[in-house]
Amino acid sequence: MKKFMFVLFALLVAPLASAAPEFKEGVEYKVVQDTASSKPVVTEFFSYVCPHCYSFQPLMNKLEQRVPDLMLKKVPVSFLGREMGPVLQRAYGAAVLLKVDDQLTPVIFDRIHRQKKMPSDLADIKAVFIANGVAEKDFDGVINSFALNGMVAQYDKLTERFEVHGTPTIVVKDKYELNMSEIGSEERFYQVVEYLLSVD
């Protein structure tokens, strides 16, 4: 009887064991901070000029659908795009302040990567905002505002804090940075993120 119970237990546990993720520090992810956030936060460091960031956006959208309570933070970096890097970083912050970031981020990505129309200055950025329903006075009111200057300073602080040198960089719970080259597939990306959201 004891032998039967042991075999039954082994059969029940085996599927769970095989289903358990085998993600390892130093392989799929690395620890970049000692303390994890208590909140289910995923931070994406990105640039509008980065083609990988452009192709990565559908994955981030699906991730939000898979994890309903997920807090997704997007941090634009300024070190890509030469002189337009800081301008595009400021453009994202302005879109956030104007509450049109969900609308304008796909538009700017599409303009740069599909239409091959790289903005050349702030006037080009302003034209994109206006063409997508933002009033000129509203854009002018935020683009050099104290609030936006503070956001840009915070973006740069986070980029430095997590030693971000390339994009996209994904940090989970302010502690774990994904090694994208080791993850290998879209489904595995979701699995790694969901696993790291479940640990401290």
Image (tube, helix red, strand yellow):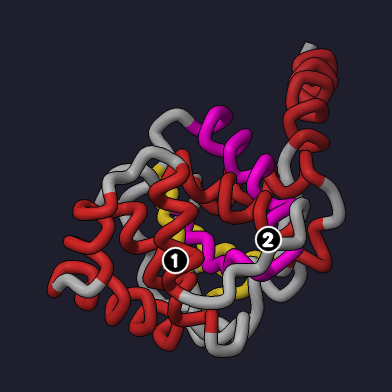
Q: Sequence order check: which comes first, mark 1 or mark 2?
A: 1
Amino acid type shown at disc 2: Ile
- Tell me if residue 56 is in the magenta stretch: yes
State the residue in front, 145 or 152: 145
The structure residue drawn at horizontal position 82% and vertical position 67%, both measured from the top left corner, is: 181
Query: How many labels sit on residues?
Result: 2
The structure residue drawn at horizontal position 66% and vertical position 68%, both measured from the top left corner, is: 118
Q: Residues within 10 Å of mark 2 (few under 14, many from 20)?
A: some
Nearer to us: label 1 or label 2: 2
Locate the N terminus and report the quarter of the image it occupies: top right
Instruction: Kindly report the secondary structure that dominates the magenta region of the rendered protein.
Output: helix
Locate the C terminus and report the quarter of the image it occupies: bottom left
Q: On residue 112, which mark appears?
A: 2
Q: Position of residue 172 (x, y in %)?
A: 50, 59
Q: Which segment did they paint magenta?
A: 42-67
State the residue in front, 166 or 102: 102
* Residue 91 falls left or right of residue 170: left
Which type of secondary structure does the marked residue at label 2 adopt? Answer: helix
State the residue in front, 74 or 2: 74
Amino acid type shown at disc 1: Val
Q: Residues within 10 Å of mark 1 (few under 14, many from 20)?
A: many
Q: Check disc 1 and report the residue beneath it.
A: 75
* Residue 170 falls left or right of residue 181: left
- Tell me if residue 2 is in the magenta stretch: no
The structure residue drawn at horizontal position 23% and vertical position 69%, both measured from the top left corner, is: 148
Question: Does the rendering let one see residue 52?
Answer: no
Q: Position of residue 79 (x, y in %)?
A: 55, 86
Q: Quadrant of residue 169?
A: bottom right
